[in-house]
Image: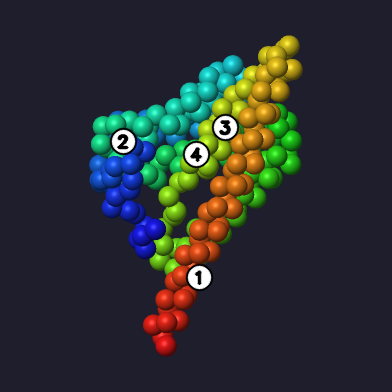
């Protein structure tokens, strides 16, 4: 991991090196912006007007498009620093906003929401420690991306189970299966980030101690 907030390059999924640019108005970034706009739209539909079917559609589009912006960025060689910030930001906003809204309307129990929020606090603490030592955020691990995908796939199914009479049995079983696996992998990814941060900090302290000697 580089000791700067943004990396100049990173490996793509195909094993080649993708150059990170400063572009703003790119197709992947526009998709990420659209996903961000979907967050307040979902909250309005779900909490204000109680248009649950429309909220399900917004959630489904936001969740299934999670991988689209990154794939297009690599495909069109439009990887950008802004995109590297927007993609995980959109993921986290979708997860947090959906959890809080679902908890408010009792679609999910508060214990499930608390477990995910605790993981986010753990990650924020690790990022704060890394920043103190001059490191930027760690690269997103495939375990974390898988967990995010499972959670974003579970949410519209759970809402479908709650909103459509007669669909609770099948949809609820599928939705909760995805949600619990997503929660477990979310914590596994969080633990991996903490271990990585701990190794970097220990290595930095060792180098600092050697230089002082």
Callout in the foreground (3, 1): 1
Q: Are dots 4 and 2 in contact, CB under 8 Å?
A: no
State the quadrant of the C terminus: bottom left
Would you call the spot at circle 4 few (<14 residues within 10 Å), some (14-19), or many (20 or more)? some
The residue labelled by disc 2 is 74
Which circle marks residue 202 in the picture?
1
Would you call the spot at circle 3 few (<14 residues within 10 Å), some (14-19), or many (20 or more)? many
Tag 2 or tag 3, which sits nearer the N-term?
2
Residue at position x 74%, y 35% from top? 109
Q: Are dots 1 and 4 in contact, CB under 8 Å?
A: no
Q: CA distance from mark 3 to mark 2?
A: 22 Å
Image spot of residue 123 (x, y percent): 55, 53
Looking at the image, residue 78 sits to the left or right of residue 38; the answer is left
Residue at position x 70%, y 39% from top? 112
Q: Secondary structure at mark 3?
A: helix
Between residue 18 and residue 123, name the one nearer to us: 18
Would you call the spot at circle 1 few (<14 residues within 10 Å), some (14-19), or many (20 or more)? few
Q: CA distance from mark 4 to mark 3?
A: 9 Å
Please indicate, yes or no, whether residue 92 appears anywhere in the rendered image. Answer: no
The residue labelled by disc 4 is 145
Q: CA distance from mark 3 to mark 1?
A: 33 Å
Between residue 37 and residue 159, name the one nearer to us: 159
Residue at position x 71%, y 23% from top? 173
Which circle marks residue 150 in the picture?
3
Q: Are dots 3 and 2 in contact, CB under 8 Å?
A: no
């Amino acid at each position: 991991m580089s000791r700067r907030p943004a990396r100049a390059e990173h490996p793509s999924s195909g094993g080649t090196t993708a150059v990170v640019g400063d572009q703003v108005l790119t197709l992947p970034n526009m998709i990420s912006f659209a996903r961000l706009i979907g967050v307040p739209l979902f909250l309005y539909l779900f909490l204000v007007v109680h248009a649950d079917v429309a909220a399900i559609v917004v959630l489904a589009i936001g969740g299934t498009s999670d991988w689209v912006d990154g794939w297009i960025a690599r495909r069109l060689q439009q990887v950008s620093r802004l995109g590297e910030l927007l993609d995980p930001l959109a993921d986290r906003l979708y997860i947090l906003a959906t959890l809080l809204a679902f908890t408010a309307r009792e679609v999910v129990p508060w214990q499930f929401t608390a477990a995910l929020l605790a993981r986010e606090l753990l990650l924020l603490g690790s990022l704060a420690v890394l920043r103190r030592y001059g490191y930027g955020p760690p690269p997103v691990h495939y375990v974390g991306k898988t967990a995010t995908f499972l959670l974003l796939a579970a949410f519209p199914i759970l809402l479908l189970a709650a909103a459509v009479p007669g669909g609770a049995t099948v949809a609820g079983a599928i939705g909760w299966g995805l949600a619990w696996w997503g929660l477990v992998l979310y914590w596994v990814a969080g633990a991996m980030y903490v271990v990585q941060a701990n190794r970097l900090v220990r290595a930095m302290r060792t180098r600092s101690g050697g230089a002082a000697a």
